[in-house]
Amino acid sequence: MFTEGQVHEFREQGFILGPRVYTDAQADELCKRMHDVIEGRSQRQAELSRNLLGDETGKVVNQVVNIWESDDLFREHIYNKAICAMTAQLIGDPVIRVWHDQIQYKPPRIGGPTNWHQDHPYWPIIQPADLVSAWTALDDATIANGCMRMVPLSHHWGPHKGGTIGTSDDTFEPTPDLEVLPKGVVIKIVPCEVPKGHVMFHHCLTWHGSPCNTSDRGRPAIAVHYMPGYTRYEPVNGHVMEKRVSVKPGEILEGEFFPTVWKNGAVAH
Ligand SMILES: O=C(O)CCC(=O)C(=O)O
């Protein structure tokens, strides 16, 4: 669990490194299963599995959405008690649901970038922007293999233009449209190394991205995007998860594909 001071730090800064939630052996097993899904050996299919960068760049970011649907251990992961308890603290709501999960695996040497962005503008069917993501490293995520970079305080600056905060270049710096930012903001980049089996949390408006992996070590991780119980289905554009929505616009987003994982201080199985 986080201390009150840590919850305050998260709300101020927009991200925080949490504790170890898996032993090395548990992280290795999840990593093995991640490769099974990416390489088509799992029994069931995830919602989406593709190279996020397409086939033309020669770089690869293996993106899998809702791996929990394809593998029982990843299904258990979304209910991980420690992660859910910390997420509920950070979000500050007694009910937590899964919006969706997401793998972005950067293979050794050819692992590509994830451009600077905010998450919520990519989710134009849910409101309000109070989600928190729990990003668990299945091996050490380091500066060398493309750990995430965050911009502290940026979640206080509102949604950026279409969610895009510049393209990735050699220096991997965000190139925002300063016109749409509050005056006087200071853009500082913090590399966030996450040791194997540890979890890091970020707010859905925090600017973040990750550069290429040019190292000899892959960068496996699983992010779960958790939403407070009051999150509504408010479609203004499309999303890959929309076909799974069974409620009406304006209603609380819940149902089989958006499981309630935490309720009133306990895991909700
Ligand atoms: O894994 C990465 O480098 C990016 C992940 C991300 O953008 C997210 O979890 O919101």
Image (spheres, rainbow, N blue to C red):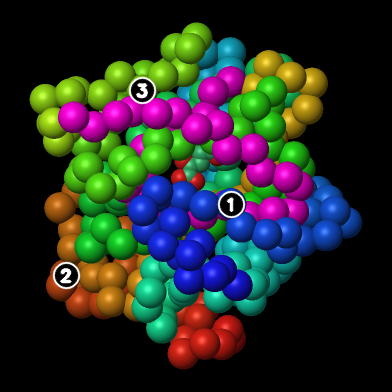
- Three-letter amino acid code of the residue under disc 3: Pro
Up the image or down, 119 lies above or below 243; here it is above
Which residue is disc 1 drawn over? 17
Q: Looking at this view, is 159 or 125 the one in front?
A: 159
Rate crowding at label 1 as few (under 14), some (14 to 19) or many (20 or more) other CA atoms within 10 Å.
Answer: some
Task: Measuring from the top left, give residue 77's x and y in whole percent.
Answer: 65, 66
The answer, for residue 252, to whether it is visible in the render is yes
Task: Measuring from the top left, give residue 64's x and y in whole percent.
Answer: 56, 46
Rate crowding at label 2 as few (under 14), some (14 to 19) or many (20 or more) other CA atoms within 10 Å.
Answer: some
- Give the mark nearer the N terminus: 3 vs 1: 1
Q: Secondary structure at mark 2?
A: loop
Q: Secondary structure at mark 3?
A: loop
- Give the mark nearer the N terminus: 2 vs 3: 3
- Three-letter amino acid code of the residue under disc 1: Leu
**Disc 3: residue Cβ within 8 A of ligand 1's nearest atom:** no
Q: How many marks?
A: 3
Which residue is disc 3 drawn over? 174
Q: Is residue 203 magenta?
A: yes
Which residue is disc 2 drawn over? 249
Magenta part of the protein: which range?
A: 184-212
Q: Residue at x 76, y 47 (%)?
A: 196
Q: Is residue 24 magenta?
A: no
Question: Spatial distance from mark 1 to mark 2, Cα to Cα?
Answer: 35 Å
**Disc 2: residue Cβ within 8 A of ligand 1's nearest atom:** no
Question: Spatial distance from mark 3 to mark 1, Cα to Cα?
Answer: 22 Å
The answer, for residue 246, to whether it is visible in the render is no
Answer whether labels 2 and 3 touch (C-beta < 8 Å): no
Q: Nearer the viewer, mark 1 or mark 2?
A: 1
Q: Nearer the viewer, mark 2 or mark 3?
A: 3
**Disc 1: residue Cβ within 8 A of ligand 1's nearest atom:** no
Give the residue at the far right of this rendering.
25
